[in-house]
Amino acid sequence: MGKRRRASERTGSKRGPLVIGLVTVVAAGGAIGAYTLYGGGGAAAEDRTSATGDHKAVKSGPVSATEIRTTATAFLTSWQHGQVAKAAAATDDSAAAAKTLTGYTKDAHITGVTLTGGTRKGATVPFSVKATVTYKGKSKPLAYESRLTVVRRAKDGVPLVSWEPSVVHPALTEGDRLVTGASGTPPVKALDRDGGELTAAKYPSLGTVLDGLREKYGKKAGGSAGIELRVVRKAAKKGADKTPDKTLLTLSEGTPGTVRTTLSPAIQAKAEQQVLTKARSSVVVMRPSTGEILAVANQSHGFNTAFQGSMAPGSTMKIVTSTLLFEKNLAKADKVHPCPKTVTYGHWKFHNDDDFEIKGGTFKGSFARSCNTAFISQAKKLKDADLTATAQRIYGLSMNNWAIGVPSFDGSVPVQRDAQMAASLIGQGAVRMNPLNMASVVSTAKTGVFHQPYLVSPSVDGRSLAKATGTMSSSTRAQLREVLQYTAAAGTAAEAMAGLGPDDGAKTGSAEVDGQKKPNGWFTAWKGDLAAAGVVQAGGHGGDSAGPIVAALLRAGS
């Protein structure tokens, strides 16, 4: 992992006004001062103003407790009363707020709104929503929790609600709409590989996967549509998969069709348990010989990071780079290979973790210890497009043509120049991956052949799976297996992989992200005909964070 940081990787009613709760802390003998109630600066700090020349004084500094209460109350009361223009004017983006709030009634057919404010935390005020959704004679109550944050507008100091679509409903992102009507796509009953039903209640990580299966196969599976309140997602950029629409409330049930997946109920259940052990963790398990996806899980269920994430993979990318070096005879697993403390390329100085060096060591030793300079030192012998070509030709990455059955990101390895090209060799720069991609990478390294991962068999809908245009040489495959097995036995992956050998291999990785104190921790490995990859965002070293999750799943599936 290099020391240089790169960019990171989203009808009203006539009720009275609302009262937003505030907590005042009282001690024996009287109230604790303004610091306890308002925050570290006290009341004086929150009433700062600035003025220059003839300009009117502008209030600055953090918003006060009174401003938070007044602003939140004004916004929520106006929204509750159906006063869209007035509610929108209480935000810092009145046009966007007005559009979403208008659609809340007009498109989503939500009426009888009651908003109840809760106790603020800093400048954020939680609130509950109770309402009714009515469409063509069908009606159901709607209830959920949301929150808003009050900020000070820079130009005049006025306190306003910081506008985000999630204020109206937490499932909304920019460009999304709330719509009530015929569902458009019939529901589906998703089955695991053994014929058991897959539900989000049983497997919480599968919520977005089930949404994707419905959108892809709802009409093909033979079901009939119902009436629903749903989030209609914004259109995807050209060449990208659209995030599936999300059902929030069902007014009348449709008839579901049936779709069988490749998921293993036992491994999926274990994956759900494992991601709960680390915050912001994601993992994918697949079968290298076929490409079948056996499990997918995310600690956070709002976005499918495991399939659609786009993050620097750190040193796990050295599997692909090693393939390139082996194919070009720039490295041999058992031959001496340089691993100095630092290497400069493109005016950047690249470091090893803690500036270690390996004198007279082999490439296998450098790989196992994750020596950055062993790879960067070869940059001067490579063309700018070499890594991209290897990722596409042998690993099937960065072609935007995977068809796994639900939306996914196929990895990105763009052509880079100078220092950025060198950084890409160690999984930084502009390289972007997710656990699905890296599970596929280690699978290809193990078998020597790319098998596109898939969640639904192509026989279900006749789609074609992506193919790699080339294969690695038998010598490269043998050397990849050697360095990966050595890393699992005696390198940075040894602790996590203890007891899993002999038919196993692994690679750890850490990827620096601007604004994070700790890097993202990556780990990818195989055991027999099982491969897995995981990431723990801001988790630190991959062997310590993602490693135990991946290893536990390989043990469970063996």
Image: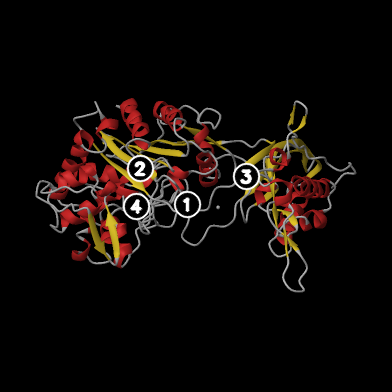
Looking at marks 2 and 4 on the same chain, the residue that comes earlier in the sequence is marked by 4
Instruction: Find disc 3 in the rendering and name its residue.
Output: 171
- Crowding at dot 4, Cα within 10 Å, few <14 / some 14-19 / many 20+, comes out as some
Q: Is residue 418 above or below residue 528?
A: below
Looking at marks 1 and 4 on the same chain, the residue that comes earlier in the sequence is marked by 4
Outermost residue toward the bottom? Answer: 54
Q: Are marks 3 and 2 in contact (CB under 8 Å)?
A: no
**Given this view, does label 3 or label 2 mark the residue nearer the observer?**
2
Residue closest to the eye, 243 or 83? 83
Residue closest to the eye, 445 or 347? 347
| Helix, strand or loop for disc 2 | strand
Q: Where, by quadrant of the figure, is residue 97 drawn?
A: bottom right
Instruction: Find disc 1 in the rendering and name its residue.
Output: 515
Instruction: Find disc 2 in the rendering and name its residue.
Output: 522
* Rendering coords of residue 445 (x, y %): 23, 45
Q: CA distance from mark 2 to mark 4?
A: 25 Å
Question: Residue drawn at (33%, 27%), measured in percent from left and top?
Answer: 557
* Rendering coords of residue 260 (x, y %): 45, 35
